[in-house]
Each structure stands twice: as C-alpha cells, then as structure tokens.
Image (cartoon, rainbow, N blue to C red):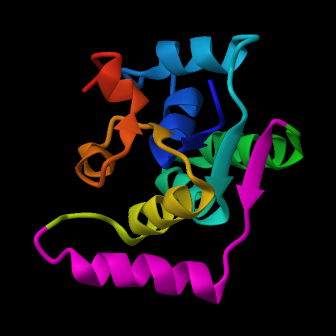
Amino acid sequence: MNAVFADTFYWVSLASPEDASHERANILDASKDRPALVTREEVLTEFLTFFGNKGPFLRKKAVAMVRAIMRDNTIRVLPQSHETFRLGFELYAARPDKSYSLPDCISMETMRREHLTEVLTNDRHFEQEGFRPLFRDLGID
C-alpha cells in the first residue's frame, strides 16, 4: 500500500478507547505493514480541538500523541500556510451544497497535490470528492 492520508477521524479513533473504530485503528497502527502516513498541521489542530474540553487527562493524552506523531519518521506532517488555507477555502466556497469542513477541504486539496487517493477516515465527504475512505470500506460507519 502506498502512502495514505490520515484524517482527524483516524487520530481520534486511536486516542479514544470508546470510539467504535478504536480497535481497527490500533490494529492498523501496530501493523508492520502500516503504510507511510501523510497528515497536516490543520488536521492535528482539529484533533487537539476535539479533546480541548474533554478534561485534563485526555487533553494531555492528545498533546503526547501529537508530539509522538511529529517525531515519527513514517508520518509526514505537512505545515500550515497561507496557500493551503487559500486552496482549502476555494474548495469550501465552491461546494455550498456540501457540509465539508474547512480542514477537510484543506486535506482534500492536499491529497490532490500529493497524488493520494486513500484516506484513513469514514467521512463520506472524501468519497464525494473521489477519494477512498478506508474505514468506510471496512464497514465502519
């Protein structure tokens, strides 16, 4: 498997034992065949925001996880920039009929530029844009 894009969904699933996708995310993460991952600082921002009001324990766990992600040489974390914001914003503006978030639009534009087709998410919005959300393929809703 080539590199895949890691969406907020994947990171939240890994960090949350009560999440319905936690076990599958952990199996993939621990696999010796896990592909190289690509993610964005915007995705990590969304991940940290998710845990922002979950109490000190989970907040610290999220911080530790982001630190580990940033040190992992099998995960490429792409930086935020005005250009990535602009590209994501243009997709967001072009899809008024969709409920895409701005971070998802930034991720989708990144996937296009990086020639990535698979994403670790169950988000149907990625499917609507022609990407393959791997956790939807696994029957996880």
Q: Where residue 71 sits in the image (x, y, percent)?
A: 89, 45
Left or right relative to 86: residue 35? right
Q: Where residue 37 sits in the image (x, y, percent)?
A: 68, 39
For this orientation, the residue located farthest to the left is 97
Total marks placed: 0
Left or right relative to 77: residue 140? left
- Confirm whether residue 129 shows in the render: yes
Left or right relative to 13: residue 67? right
Quarter the C terminus occupies: top left
Quarter the N terminus occupies: top right
Image height check: is 16 above or below 24? below
- Confirm whether residue 52 shows in the render: no
Q: Does the segment drawn in magenta span residue 82?
A: yes
Quadrant in the picture for residue 36: top right
Image height check: is 134 above or below 109? above
- In the image, 61 versus 125, the foreground residue is 125
Q: Where residue 138 sits in the image (x, y, percent)?
A: 35, 16
Left or right relative to 56: residue 9? left
| The residue stretch that appears in magenta | 74-97
Question: Residue at 67% of width from left, 82% of height from top?
Answer: 81
Question: Residue at 27% of width from left, 51% of height from top?
Answer: 125
